Image (tube, grey):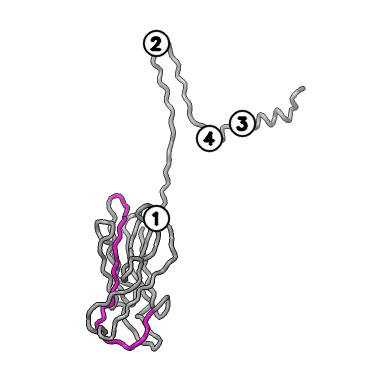
Amino acid sequence: MKTSIAVKSLLGAASLALPLFAFAESNVQTGAATSAPGATAHVDFTVVIPKILYLRVGTGSSYTTGALTSTPTIDLITFSPTSAQLGSGTAVAGTGGDLAGGVETAAIVSNSGNVTLNATAGGALTNAGGDTISYSQITTTASTLTSATALPAPVLSNTTSANVVLTAPATKVITQDAKWTFAYANTAIVPTGTYGGVNTNNGRVVYTATMP
C-alpha cells in the first residue's frame, strides 16, 4: 500500500519539529587501534535559591532542622503581681510562653544580607476604665538558646521600638535565636483592672523583621 501524500507531509513536519526537544549531548571519536581517542560531553546546571526570611517569637515551627513553615499560634503572657508586691519595684515573672514562665523562643533565619527587627504596639496597655500601663514596664531579657550569640530583643515602647540590626556574615546567611524572658517591672502602683489581653486593649505587640 502506498503512503499518501498527506501522511508523508505529516511525517516530514514531525521530523522538522524534533530539534525543538532537549537532547543530551553525545560525541563520537574514532581512531586507529593503536591510538587513544578522547570524547567529551557537557551538561549545564542551574540551582535557583529563593529568598527566605523566617521570624519566630513564641510557638512556631522547627527552624534548626530546616523545616521553615508558618504557624498561626499567638502566645499570651500574663503578669499577676500580688497586693504585697504591687509597686515594689521588684520585677514580676510572667506565665505562659512556649518555654513557660513568660519565656519565648525567638529566632531569625535569612539568606539575603542584614536583617532589621523591631516591635510595634498600638499604644499603652489599657483597662476597661481607661487607665494605662506603659509598655516600658514590660522588659525583655535575651539569653542564648542554640546559637552562639543570643538574638537581641527590641525594647518595647507604646509605639515602634528602636531597630535591632543583625549584620550578616560573608555568607549572607543568618541563623540566630534566643530565649526571650518577659517581666513586669512593677515600679508603680496603678489602678485595679485587667490591662491588655488577647488582641484587645492594646495587648498585642507585632514583631517585624525586614531584609533587602
The kind of residue on which mark 1 rests is: Ile
SS label for mark 1 = loop
106 left or right, relative to 4? left
How far across and how far down the image is residue 200, in percent?
Answer: 42, 79
How far across and how far down the image is residue 28, in percent?
Answer: 47, 21
Question: Residue at the left extreme?
Answer: 89
How far across and how far down the image is residue 145, in percent?
Answer: 28, 60
> How many neighbours does mark 3 have within 10 angstroms: few (below 14), some (14-19), or many (20 or more)?
few
- State which mark lies toward you, 3 or 2: 2
Q: In this figure, which residue is indicated by the disc labeled 1?
A: 52
Is the C-beta separation of discs 2 and 1 under 8 Å? Answer: no
- Region of the chain picked out in magenta, as a range: 170-196
Residue 125 against residue 45 in the figure, above or below? below
Q: In this figure, which residue is indicated by the disc labeled 3?
A: 16
On-image quarter of the N terminus:
top right
Q: In this figure, which residue is indicated by the disc labeled 2?
A: 34
Task: Name the image quarter holding residue 123.
Answer: bottom left
How far across and how far down the image is residue 62, in percent?
Answer: 38, 57
> How many neighbours does mark 1 have within 10 angstroms: few (below 14), some (14-19), or many (20 or more)?
few
Q: In this figure, which residue is indicated by the disc labeled 4?
A: 22
SS label for mark 3 = helix
Q: Residue at x 43, y 36 (%)?
A: 44
Q: Inspect the magenta stretch and tell me whether residue 171 lies in it.
A: yes
- State which mark lies toward you, 3 or 4: 4
Whole-Å distance between the Cαs marked 1 and 4? 32 Å
Mark closer to the chain start, 1 or 4: 4
Mark closer to the chain start, 2 or 1: 2
> How many neighbours does mark 2 have within 10 angstroms: few (below 14), some (14-19), or many (20 or more)?
few
Mark closer to the chain start, 1 or 3: 3
- State which mark lies toward you, 1 or 3: 1
